[in-house]
Amino acid sequence: MRHRSLLSACAAVVLLSALPALAEAPVTGGQSAEAAFTYSDMLAANRLSDPRVSPDGRHVVYAVRATDMAANRGVTSLFIQDLNGQGEPRRLAISDGGANTARWGSDGALYFLSGRSGSSQVWKTDATGATATQVTTLPLDVNAYRLSPDASKVAVSLAVYPTCGDLACSVARGEEAAARKSTGQVYDRMFVRHWDTWADGTQNHLFVLNTDGSGAPVWVTHGFDGDTPSKPFGDEGEFTFTPDGSAVVFSARVAGQSEPWSTNFDLFRTNGLTGQGFTNLTDDNDAWDTGPVFSPDGRTLAYRAMARPGFEADRWQITLMDVATGAKRQIAANWDRSADSLQWSADGRTLYVVAGDVGQTRLFAIQVANGSVVPITGPGHVSAVEQTPSGFVFAQDSLTSPSELFVKTFRGREMPRQITNVNPQLDALQFGEAEQFTFAGWNDGTVHAYVIKPAGYVEGRKYPVAFLIHGGPQGSFGNAWSYRWNAMTYAGAGYAVVMIDFHGSTGYGQAFTDAISQHWGDRPLEDLQKGWAAAQAKYDFLDGDRACALGASYGGYMVNWIAGNWADEFQCLVNHDGIFDTFGMGYATEELWFTEWENGGTPYDVPEAYQRFNPANHVANWSDPMLVIQGDRDFRVPTTQALSTFTALQRRGIESRLVVFPDENHWVLKPQNSLQWHTEVFGWLDRHLKPQD
């Protein structure tokens, strides 16, 4: 139920131009354009991600995913751009064979993953990107990799059977499983299924190889019971070589019998590169430790750590470990923001941190000596950062723009300079105008929200409203672009939009985030009610008699809760993968630590807590028309929750519709499915909120 960005990597020719613009421009849409931005425009938009700066600081390589609607898939290409602003971005020819996860080596070569040989392996090229040389020839797919500091070695993650002694055994076991005629699966421990896949007995483990092809791969995590990177969203940010390349430090959780209800990830250092065991570096912390990064001099290991076991939305605090002594200390301990990523400056005096901040996601500089924090970027959502000799290259998006690359000097006061424009077609479209506002919510606390005018707004008119409720529940609907819940698609369809970052949202301090736990149905609902009233009082273009509430995951839960506890306020409701029965959810979901933390214990220890804010207990009050949508491969909020919702609606004779995607998980990702999702949702809104001809 956590919101995470899913950046796909796959290949197509995209026309790019370097058109300078301001990264910190106000969140507004041009009112002179004729055509409004629509969900079809969103689905067709190119998706930039994963910028990587060359060791000499002259170039940045990045991925651009184009959408092939006919083939129903995304296709990714790698592009290279000169950072001095000269010339146009150039698509690398190696993209024709499939290329993703590009990483520069200190040797100047550009490494990447490709399936051109029939399986996902590590390849390399030079800055021209004309030809590719295969680096690994492993019998299993490489799902993540990390180069050693001198690029002489590469650590790769492979899905292997942990009880095997070598790769040949894992290959044989996989072939035997595929050839087996019976289909019954036997489990002796959880996870039985996770996110959207059933457990098959494999785990992600690390192997180290020489990049020159000599020697055999060494299974450096052999004997560890767990995954690295973690499933389902882990990447190479969870493991790294030591500065001298003699060992690997990785973040992982011991699976054992408690994996589904444990968040105890630790940092482990392999005992050399021999496959002869590992040492726990953070055994003193029973909560989450991850993201290891070594200082330039190799003396300090920085990482992100949570303090409370079992809580996935605790604040990521920054910890520094003395490599020689193991002594640890926190920096910026009083900074009430959660660090999403860490990077050292070249001189080792500063840590650069990305963190959510009052509806924005900014880059910050933290001085290691005294913990002072200074913001570097302004409004918008920073999704990736790379350093150059003179400053930064960062990917940033906003409510009105998908991700683009910008450059900024370390200490310069100048505005960031945009160096990519992967979606020039959007420049001719009209977006809604967004404004952030505040009001007094639960406990008279300040709550932030956004209101967005419809594209083509005309002063004096009233407009129907899409009332969007974010998931998480520890998430945010802020100044950011989305390919699933994009506020501007509603504005482009003629709707005003209201989005409230209720108590429980991230980016407003940990106490604000904590306020939702064990209070799913009262404090957030109070914020939504007061925020909706405040918005209508402040913005006279909102038509409160023509409004629909929409949400997914926790937002879908809240839609169900609204149906029974704020009935008749909205003319329609949309519930995507939402929780109907919190008690049943406590037994049916996969990551049990989530439901147990949010309800203060297990369903059998504190059943009353699970029933306190259970939408299933208020079905008798339901009356609002509801559209229910479900991905059948969603194991976070299983399909039975949607079926129960629809059954309740139908049994009570309430106008309702159920849309099930058999091949989607918690998110709708396939282009044609996304098109159908939007067609159904906007059709539902139009049916109930717009006058019929």
Image (cartoon, rainbow, N blue to C red):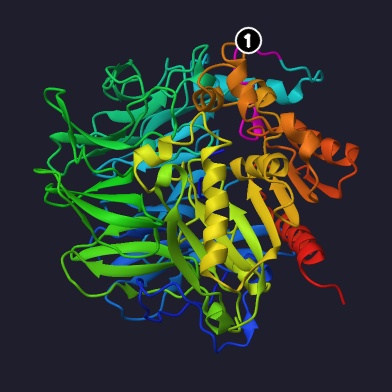
**Residue sitting nearer the eye, 283 or 655:** 655
Q: Is residue 469 above or below residue 520?
A: below
**Residue sitting nearer the eye, 447 or 138:** 447
Secondary element under disc 1, as helix, strand or loop, is loop
Q: Position of residue 85 (x, y in %)?
A: 30, 78
Q: Count the labels in the image.
A: 1
Res. 244 in view: no
- The secondary structure that most of the magenta stretch takes on is loop
Image quarter hosting the C terminus: bottom right
Q: Residue furthest left?
A: 369
Highlighted range, magenta: 186-201
**Residue 545, located in which quarter of the rendered image?**
bottom right
Q: Dot 1, how many residues are within 10 Å of its Cα: few (below 14), some (14-19), or many (20+)?
A: few
Q: Position of residue 348 (x, y in %)?
A: 13, 47
Q: Is residue 479 left or right of residue 673?
A: left
Image quarter hosting the N terminus: top right
Q: Is residue 263 above or below residue 131?
A: above
Q: Residue at x 53, y 29 (%)?
A: 159
Res. 282 in view: yes
**Residue sitting nearer the eye, 464 or 84:** 464
Amino acid beneath label 1? Asp
Q: Position of residue 567 (x, y in %)?
A: 72, 46
Residue 188 magenta-highlighted: yes
**Residue 88, located in which quarter of the rendered image?**
bottom left
**Residue 293, located in which quarter of the rendered image?**
top left
Q: Residue at x 40, y 81 (%)?
A: 19
Residue 82 magenta-highlighted: no
Label 1, on which residue? 188
**Residue sitting nearer the eye, 658 or 420:** 658
